[in-house]
Amino acid sequence: MDVLTLQIRRLRPSAVLPAYQTDLAAGMDLSADLDAPVVLEPGDIALIPCGFAMALPPGFEAQVRPRSGLATKFGISMPNAPGTVDADYRGEMKVPLINLGRQAFTVEPGMRVAQMIIARVARAEVSVVHELTETSRGAGGFGSTGFGQP
């Protein structure tokens, strides 16, 4: 298993650092660093601060994703899921949350609100061509490969 160093700078003493909850977890949980609870009414979006900044190594990104428990139990997700944090960003980590549920939801200080996966990034060189290689799918779009069982 690859292990890399993720440099973290606490911006507030109350910040909970990103942490894996189990030995084989893919993502580190991100926690809300709030002075007071934030209420999300149905349809509301709020940017939730985490209280830290970080430095990713070159060639990596952080993918920020909703927590499955919050999504399935309360309809709490992210409007840009997954969000990308670039290796050159040094500002505070914040998580945009949206309430897709039918009831108000309260984000409490210290609550785990999202998960962050550190992933390698491949950079592409753009090449303009006159023809693309053929495939069996071709230009077929949404639903073009069918639905259900093969």
Image (cartoon, helix red, strand yellow):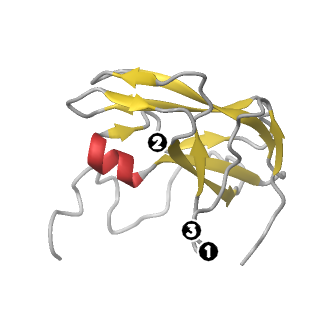
Does 51 sit above or below residue 86?
A: above
Within-10-Å neighbours for mark 1: few <14, some 14–19, many 20+ = few
Spot occupied by residue 88 in the image (x, y as percentages of width and height) = 81, 38
What is the three-letter code of the residue carrying label 2? Answer: Ala
Evaluate whether residue 128 shows in this view. Answer: yes
Residue 41 in picture, x, y percent from top left? 31, 21
Mark 1 or mark 2: which comes first in sequence?
A: 1
Rendered image: mark on residue 31: none
Disc 3 to disc 1, how far (Cα)? Answer: 6 Å
Q: Residue at x 42, y 64 (%)?
A: 134
Figure label count: 3
Q: Label 1 near label 3: C-beta < 8 Å? A: yes
Q: Secondary structure at mark 3?
A: loop
Q: Which mark is residue 81?
A: 2
Nearer-the-camera pick, 129 or 21: 21
Q: Nearer the viewer, mark 2 or mark 3?
A: 3
Nearer the camera: disc 1 or disc 2? 1
- Distance between the alpha carbons at the discs numbered 2 and 3: 19 Å
Give the class, few, some or many, for how many residues have Cα within 10 Å of label 3's Cα (few <14, many ≥20). few
Left/right placement of residue 8 relative to residue 105 reads right
Counting from the top left corner in percent of width and height, residue 94 is at 62, 31
Q: CA distance from mark 1 to mark 2?
A: 24 Å
Q: Quadrant of residue 35?
A: top right
> Badge 2: few (under 14), some or many (20 or more) residues near its Cα, within 10 Å?
few
* Quadrant hosting residue 74: top left
Q: Earlier in the sequence, mark 2 or mark 3?
A: 3
Reply above or below: 57 against 98.
below
Residue type pointed to by label 1: Asp
**Residue denoted by label 3:** 25
In the drawing, does residue 143 fall left or right of residue 81? left
For label 1, the residue is 23
